[in-house]
Image: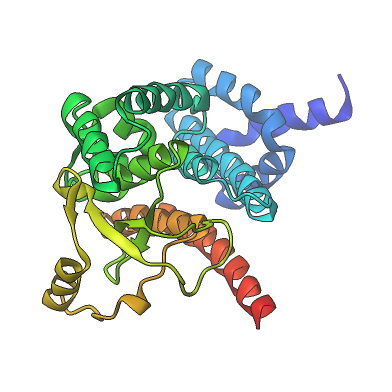
Amino acid sequence: MDKSEKELNSLIYLLDDPDREIYSNVKTKLIGFGKQVLERLESTWEFTQDELVQERIEEIIHQINFEQLKGRFSEWLDADTHDLFDGINLVCTYQYPDLNFERIKSILRILKKDIWLEMGLNYSPIKSITIFNRLFFESYGFKAVNHTNETPQYLYINHVLSAKKGEPLSISLIYILLANQLNIPVHAIALPNNQIILAYLTHPFNPVLPAYSYDGDIEFLINPAEQGGIFNKDHFLRYLKANGFPADLREYAPCTNIQLIRILLDNIGQYYETHNRFNKSSELKELISMLDQFLDKLKEAAK
Protein backbone atom coordinates (compact mmCIF):
# COMPACT_ATOMS: atom_id res chain seq x y z
CA MET A 1 0.00 0.00 0.00
CA ASP A 2 1.53 3.32 -1.08
CA LYS A 3 1.54 6.53 0.93
CA SER A 4 -1.44 8.10 -0.84
CA GLU A 5 -3.53 4.95 -0.32
CA LYS A 6 -2.70 4.95 3.39
CA GLU A 7 -3.64 8.63 3.64
CA LEU A 8 -6.90 7.99 1.83
CA ASN A 9 -7.80 5.17 4.20
CA SER A 10 -7.06 7.37 7.18
CA LEU A 11 -9.17 10.22 5.83
CA ILE A 12 -12.15 7.94 5.12
CA TYR A 13 -11.80 6.47 8.62
CA LEU A 14 -12.15 10.00 10.04
CA LEU A 15 -15.36 10.81 8.17
CA ASP A 16 -17.43 10.06 11.25
CA ASP A 17 -15.41 12.32 13.55
CA PRO A 18 -17.85 14.65 15.38
CA ASP A 19 -15.31 17.48 15.48
CA ARG A 20 -16.28 19.92 12.72
CA GLU A 21 -12.74 21.26 12.40
CA ILE A 22 -11.33 17.78 11.88
CA TYR A 23 -14.02 17.03 9.31
CA SER A 24 -13.28 20.30 7.51
CA ASN A 25 -9.63 19.27 7.12
CA VAL A 26 -10.61 15.76 6.01
CA LYS A 27 -13.04 17.19 3.47
CA THR A 28 -10.42 19.57 2.02
CA LYS A 29 -7.87 16.79 1.64
CA LEU A 30 -10.34 14.36 0.06
CA ILE A 31 -11.44 17.01 -2.42
CA GLY A 32 -7.77 17.51 -3.24
CA PHE A 33 -7.58 13.89 -4.45
CA GLY A 34 -10.00 14.81 -7.23
CA LYS A 35 -12.06 12.37 -9.27
CA GLN A 36 -9.69 9.46 -8.54
CA VAL A 37 -11.28 9.15 -5.09
CA LEU A 38 -14.90 9.12 -6.28
CA GLU A 39 -15.21 5.35 -6.70
CA ARG A 40 -13.81 4.73 -3.22
CA LEU A 41 -16.19 7.28 -1.67
CA GLU A 42 -19.19 5.83 -3.48
CA SER A 43 -18.25 2.35 -2.27
CA THR A 44 -17.92 3.60 1.31
CA TRP A 45 -21.32 5.29 1.07
CA GLU A 46 -22.95 2.02 -0.02
CA PHE A 47 -21.52 -0.06 2.81
CA THR A 48 -21.87 2.33 5.73
CA GLN A 49 -25.02 2.61 7.82
CA ASP A 50 -23.88 5.86 9.39
CA GLU A 51 -26.13 8.64 8.07
CA LEU A 52 -23.62 11.33 9.04
CA VAL A 53 -20.90 9.63 7.02
CA GLN A 54 -23.25 9.24 4.06
CA GLU A 55 -24.21 12.91 4.23
CA ARG A 56 -20.57 13.96 4.36
CA ILE A 57 -19.62 11.69 1.47
CA GLU A 58 -22.42 13.16 -0.64
CA GLU A 59 -21.15 16.64 0.17
CA ILE A 60 -17.57 15.75 -0.78
CA ILE A 61 -18.58 13.96 -3.99
CA HIS A 62 -20.67 16.95 -5.03
CA GLN A 63 -17.78 19.32 -4.36
CA ILE A 64 -15.34 17.17 -6.35
CA ASN A 65 -17.82 17.04 -9.25
CA PHE A 66 -18.34 20.78 -9.05
CA GLU A 67 -14.60 21.47 -9.20
CA GLN A 68 -14.41 19.18 -12.24
CA LEU A 69 -17.34 21.04 -13.78
CA LYS A 70 -15.66 24.42 -13.32
CA GLY A 71 -12.62 23.08 -15.12
CA ARG A 72 -14.76 21.87 -18.02
CA PHE A 73 -16.54 25.23 -18.20
CA SER A 74 -13.17 26.94 -18.37
CA GLU A 75 -12.17 24.64 -21.25
CA TRP A 76 -15.48 25.35 -23.01
CA LEU A 77 -14.88 29.09 -22.75
CA ASP A 78 -11.31 28.79 -24.00
CA ALA A 79 -12.40 26.76 -27.04
CA ASP A 80 -13.09 28.58 -30.28
CA THR A 81 -16.47 26.97 -30.89
CA HIS A 82 -18.48 27.60 -27.68
CA ASP A 83 -20.71 24.82 -28.94
CA LEU A 84 -24.25 25.31 -27.62
CA PHE A 85 -24.96 21.61 -27.21
CA ASP A 86 -21.79 21.12 -25.18
CA GLY A 87 -22.57 24.17 -23.04
CA ILE A 88 -26.10 22.97 -22.28
CA ASN A 89 -24.79 19.54 -21.38
CA LEU A 90 -22.32 21.10 -18.97
CA VAL A 91 -25.22 22.83 -17.23
CA CYS A 92 -27.09 19.52 -17.04
CA THR A 93 -23.99 17.88 -15.56
CA TYR A 94 -24.32 20.15 -12.54
CA GLN A 95 -27.44 18.23 -11.50
CA TYR A 96 -26.67 14.95 -13.30
CA PRO A 97 -22.90 14.24 -13.03
CA ASP A 98 -23.22 10.86 -14.77
CA LEU A 99 -25.33 12.18 -17.65
CA ASN A 100 -25.19 10.13 -20.87
CA PHE A 101 -24.54 12.73 -23.58
CA GLU A 102 -24.78 10.15 -26.35
CA ARG A 103 -28.38 9.38 -25.46
CA ILE A 104 -29.27 13.09 -25.77
CA LYS A 105 -27.46 13.27 -29.12
CA SER A 106 -29.36 10.20 -30.31
CA ILE A 107 -32.75 11.73 -29.46
CA LEU A 108 -31.85 14.96 -31.25
CA ARG A 109 -30.62 13.04 -34.31
CA ILE A 110 -33.97 11.26 -34.60
CA LEU A 111 -35.90 14.53 -34.26
CA LYS A 112 -33.66 16.23 -36.82
CA LYS A 113 -34.02 13.41 -39.34
CA ASP A 114 -37.82 13.35 -39.10
CA ILE A 115 -38.10 17.11 -39.54
CA TRP A 116 -35.59 17.12 -42.41
CA LEU A 117 -37.51 14.41 -44.27
CA GLU A 118 -40.67 16.53 -44.15
CA MET A 119 -39.06 19.75 -45.31
CA GLY A 120 -38.80 20.74 -48.95
CA LEU A 121 -35.64 22.43 -50.19
CA ASN A 122 -37.46 25.41 -51.62
CA TYR A 123 -40.02 26.04 -48.91
CA SER A 124 -40.47 29.60 -47.72
CA PRO A 125 -39.27 30.48 -44.19
CA ILE A 126 -42.86 30.53 -42.91
CA LYS A 127 -43.64 27.15 -44.51
CA SER A 128 -40.44 25.61 -43.10
CA ILE A 129 -41.19 26.77 -39.55
CA THR A 130 -44.82 25.67 -39.85
CA ILE A 131 -43.65 22.15 -40.69
CA PHE A 132 -41.05 22.29 -37.93
CA ASN A 133 -43.71 23.35 -35.40
CA ARG A 134 -46.16 20.66 -36.49
CA LEU A 135 -43.61 17.89 -36.00
CA PHE A 136 -42.00 19.28 -32.87
CA PHE A 137 -45.12 20.31 -30.96
CA GLU A 138 -47.86 18.10 -32.42
CA SER A 139 -46.22 14.89 -33.61
CA TYR A 140 -43.64 14.66 -30.85
CA GLY A 141 -45.78 16.43 -28.27
CA PHE A 142 -43.26 18.91 -26.86
CA LYS A 143 -44.97 21.46 -24.67
CA ALA A 144 -43.88 24.53 -22.75
CA VAL A 145 -45.03 24.61 -19.13
CA ASN A 146 -44.29 26.83 -16.14
CA HIS A 147 -43.20 24.46 -13.40
CA THR A 148 -40.03 26.14 -12.14
CA ASN A 149 -41.73 26.97 -8.85
CA GLU A 150 -42.21 23.24 -8.30
CA THR A 151 -38.94 21.78 -9.59
CA PRO A 152 -35.91 22.90 -11.61
CA GLN A 153 -35.97 19.67 -13.65
CA TYR A 154 -37.95 21.35 -16.41
CA LEU A 155 -34.94 23.54 -17.11
CA TYR A 156 -32.56 20.61 -17.68
CA ILE A 157 -32.92 19.49 -21.29
CA ASN A 158 -32.09 15.84 -20.60
CA HIS A 159 -35.23 15.72 -18.44
CA VAL A 160 -37.23 17.79 -20.95
CA LEU A 161 -36.36 15.44 -23.82
CA SER A 162 -37.69 12.51 -21.77
CA ALA A 163 -40.77 14.24 -20.34
CA LYS A 164 -41.60 16.09 -23.60
CA LYS A 165 -42.36 19.20 -21.59
CA GLY A 166 -40.28 21.93 -20.05
CA GLU A 167 -39.96 25.58 -19.23
CA PRO A 168 -40.26 27.90 -22.26
CA LEU A 169 -36.50 28.52 -21.98
CA SER A 170 -35.52 24.84 -22.19
CA ILE A 171 -38.03 24.15 -24.98
CA SER A 172 -36.55 27.13 -26.85
CA LEU A 173 -33.01 25.79 -26.44
CA ILE A 174 -33.97 22.40 -27.90
CA TYR A 175 -35.74 24.25 -30.74
CA ILE A 176 -32.54 26.23 -31.46
CA LEU A 177 -30.36 23.11 -31.37
CA LEU A 178 -32.56 21.38 -33.94
CA ALA A 179 -32.90 24.49 -36.12
CA ASN A 180 -29.12 24.96 -36.17
CA GLN A 181 -28.59 21.33 -37.18
CA LEU A 182 -31.05 21.86 -40.04
CA ASN A 183 -29.36 25.12 -41.11
CA ILE A 184 -32.50 27.10 -40.28
CA PRO A 185 -31.45 30.62 -39.18
CA VAL A 186 -33.39 30.65 -35.91
CA HIS A 187 -31.63 32.33 -33.00
CA ALA A 188 -32.52 33.62 -29.56
CA ILE A 189 -33.15 37.20 -28.55
CA ALA A 190 -32.83 37.95 -24.85
CA LEU A 191 -35.67 39.75 -23.12
CA PRO A 192 -35.29 41.98 -20.05
CA ASN A 193 -37.14 39.43 -17.88
CA ASN A 194 -34.30 36.91 -18.30
CA GLN A 195 -36.26 34.90 -20.88
CA ILE A 196 -35.80 34.58 -24.62
CA ILE A 197 -37.86 34.78 -27.79
CA LEU A 198 -36.80 33.19 -31.06
CA ALA A 199 -36.20 35.06 -34.30
CA TYR A 200 -35.89 33.87 -37.89
CA LEU A 201 -33.04 36.04 -39.18
CA THR A 202 -32.57 37.37 -42.70
CA HIS A 203 -28.76 37.45 -42.55
CA PRO A 204 -26.17 35.02 -41.20
CA PHE A 205 -25.34 35.28 -37.52
CA ASN A 206 -22.47 33.55 -35.76
CA PRO A 207 -23.54 32.78 -32.15
CA VAL A 208 -19.93 32.16 -31.18
CA LEU A 209 -18.64 35.66 -31.82
CA PRO A 210 -19.60 38.53 -29.50
CA ALA A 211 -22.45 40.50 -31.04
CA TYR A 212 -23.54 43.75 -29.45
CA SER A 213 -25.53 44.75 -32.52
CA TYR A 214 -26.89 42.88 -35.51
CA ASP A 215 -26.69 44.35 -39.01
CA GLY A 216 -29.29 42.00 -40.46
CA ASP A 217 -33.01 41.97 -39.98
CA ILE A 218 -35.70 39.78 -38.44
CA GLU A 219 -37.97 37.95 -40.85
CA PHE A 220 -40.42 37.02 -38.08
CA LEU A 221 -40.45 35.82 -34.50
CA ILE A 222 -41.36 32.48 -32.94
CA ASN A 223 -42.74 31.85 -29.47
CA PRO A 224 -42.17 28.25 -28.31
CA ALA A 225 -44.25 29.02 -25.20
CA GLU A 226 -47.25 29.18 -27.55
CA GLN A 227 -46.58 26.02 -29.58
CA GLY A 228 -44.22 27.90 -31.89
CA GLY A 229 -46.60 30.75 -32.59
CA ILE A 230 -45.31 32.96 -35.42
CA PHE A 231 -45.66 36.74 -35.25
CA ASN A 232 -44.22 39.79 -36.97
CA LYS A 233 -42.07 42.64 -35.68
CA ASP A 234 -45.03 44.95 -35.08
CA HIS A 235 -46.60 42.33 -32.83
CA PHE A 236 -43.28 41.99 -31.02
CA LEU A 237 -43.04 45.74 -30.46
CA ARG A 238 -46.55 45.77 -29.00
CA TYR A 239 -45.55 42.93 -26.69
CA LEU A 240 -42.47 44.85 -25.55
CA LYS A 241 -44.50 48.00 -24.84
CA ALA A 242 -47.21 46.06 -22.99
CA ASN A 243 -44.59 44.57 -20.67
CA GLY A 244 -42.75 47.84 -20.07
CA PHE A 245 -39.65 46.74 -22.01
CA PRO A 246 -37.68 49.05 -24.32
CA ALA A 247 -39.58 49.04 -27.62
CA ASP A 248 -36.61 49.54 -29.92
CA LEU A 249 -35.49 46.55 -31.97
CA ARG A 250 -31.93 47.87 -31.95
CA GLU A 251 -31.84 46.94 -28.26
CA TYR A 252 -32.35 43.27 -29.09
CA ALA A 253 -29.37 41.66 -30.80
CA PRO A 254 -29.31 37.86 -31.21
CA CYS A 255 -27.74 35.99 -28.30
CA THR A 256 -24.35 34.35 -28.43
CA ASN A 257 -24.08 30.82 -27.08
CA ILE A 258 -22.32 32.11 -23.98
CA GLN A 259 -25.20 34.49 -23.29
CA LEU A 260 -27.69 31.64 -23.67
CA ILE A 261 -25.80 29.47 -21.19
CA ARG A 262 -25.69 32.40 -18.79
CA ILE A 263 -29.46 32.85 -19.01
CA LEU A 264 -29.99 29.13 -18.40
CA LEU A 265 -27.71 29.12 -15.35
CA ASP A 266 -29.40 32.23 -13.98
CA ASN A 267 -32.88 30.71 -14.32
CA ILE A 268 -31.83 27.52 -12.53
CA GLY A 269 -30.06 29.54 -9.86
CA GLN A 270 -33.18 31.62 -9.24
CA TYR A 271 -35.12 28.45 -8.46
CA TYR A 272 -32.58 27.32 -5.88
CA GLU A 273 -32.41 30.76 -4.30
CA THR A 274 -36.20 31.05 -4.10
CA HIS A 275 -36.31 27.67 -2.35
CA ASN A 276 -33.53 28.59 0.10
CA ARG A 277 -31.01 26.19 -1.41
CA PHE A 278 -28.31 28.80 -1.13
CA ASN A 279 -25.35 26.45 -1.53
CA LYS A 280 -26.57 25.52 -5.00
CA SER A 281 -27.48 29.06 -6.00
CA SER A 282 -24.05 30.21 -4.82
CA GLU A 283 -22.32 27.58 -6.97
CA LEU A 284 -24.32 28.58 -10.03
CA LYS A 285 -23.42 32.22 -9.40
CA GLU A 286 -19.81 31.09 -9.42
CA LEU A 287 -20.28 29.60 -12.90
CA ILE A 288 -22.10 32.74 -14.05
CA SER A 289 -19.19 34.83 -12.78
CA MET A 290 -16.83 32.78 -14.96
CA LEU A 291 -18.97 33.59 -18.00
CA ASP A 292 -19.22 37.27 -17.06
CA GLN A 293 -15.47 37.59 -16.65
CA PHE A 294 -14.95 36.01 -20.06
CA LEU A 295 -17.50 38.33 -21.68
CA ASP A 296 -15.86 41.35 -20.02
CA LYS A 297 -12.53 40.33 -21.53
CA LEU A 298 -14.15 40.12 -24.97
CA LYS A 299 -15.64 43.59 -24.54
CA GLU A 300 -12.26 45.01 -23.53
CA ALA A 301 -10.57 43.36 -26.49
CA ALA A 302 -13.19 44.81 -28.84
CA LYS A 303 -12.52 48.42 -27.73
Image location (x, y in percent) of residue 71? 66, 48
Report the front residue among 137 and 85.
Answer: 137
- For the view shown, which residue lies furthest in the right direction? 2
Residue 214 position within the rendered picture, expressed as x and y whole percent measured from the top left: 45, 70
In the displayed structure, would residue 260 be above or below residue 124? below
Res. 189 image quadrant: bottom left
Residue, x 24% and y 53% (percent of image)?
Answer: 222
Q: Nearer the viewer, residue 18 or 291?
A: 291
Q: Residue at x 73, y 37 (%)?
A: 33
Q: Nearer the viewer, residue 131 or 89?
A: 131
Q: Residue furthest top?
A: 47
Between 17 and 258, the one nearer to me in the picture: 258
Q: Residue 207 location, x and y as percent?
A: 51, 56
Say if residue 40 shows up in the picture: yes
Q: In the rendered picture of this protein, how many numbered marks are placed on residues?
A: 0
Q: Quadrant of the N terminus?
A: top right
Q: From this viewpoint, is residue 196 visible?
A: no
- Left or right, 135 with reference to 226: right
* Quarter placement of the C terminus: bottom right
Is 241 situated above or below 210? below
The residue at the point 55 percent across, 34 percent down is 16
